[in-house]
Image (spheres, rainbow, N blue to C red):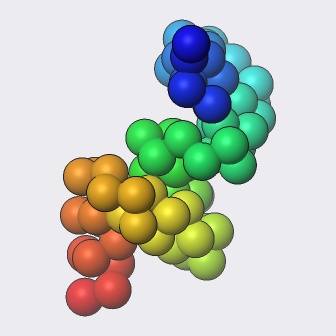
Amino acid sequence: PVPPGEQDFLDAERVRSSQPLRARTLYERAARFGHPRTQATLGMMLFSDGNRTGALRWLKAASDQGEPRGMLLWGTALF
C-alpha cells in the first residue's frame, strides 16, 4: 500500500512546473496527511513566498518526523 499523502506528493512533483496552483493544493493535502517530505517541500515553498509562519509550521512538522531537509531548514530558521 502507498503511504498516506504519497500519491499527492508524486502528483504535485509531476505538475509543479506546468500547474503550480494545482501542485500547491496537492502539497497541502499531502502535508495534512502527515507526509514528511511534502511538509518540508511545502515549508520551503511558503518560506520562499514570504510566509514565514506557515513555513515554520510545516518545517517543524517535517523535522519532528526526522525528515532530513525539514530538520536542516527548521534548525536554520531558528538560528
Q: Choose top left, top right, bottom left or bottom right for residue 70.
A: bottom left
Q: Is residue 28 left or right of residue 72?
A: right
Write the residue at 61% across / 77% down: 53
2 is higher (above) or lower (below) than 29 = above
Q: Residue 20, located in which quarter of the rendered image?
A: top right
Q: Is residue 38 left or right of residue 31?
A: left
Rendered view: 17 above or below 71: above
Is 9 or 20 nearer to us in this picture? 9
Residue 31: x and y in percent read 62, 46
Q: Is residue 79 left or right of residue 40?
A: left
Residue 59 visible, this angle: no
- Could you tell me residue 38's position as x and y percent? 51, 40
Residue at 74%, 39% (x, y): give it. Answer: 29
The residue at the far front in this view is: 1
**Any part of residue 60 in sight:** yes
Residue under the image location 51 percent in, 73 percent down: 56
Image quadrant holding the C terminus, namely bottom left
- Viewer-proximal residue, 1 or 79? 1
Q: Which residue does the image show at 52% across and 50% down from the upper left?
A: 39
Most foreground residue, 5 or 54: 5
Q: Quadrant of the N terminus?
A: top right
Foreground pick, 78 / 29: 29
Q: Quadrant of residue 16?
A: top right
Tell me residue 8's x, y (percent): 65, 23
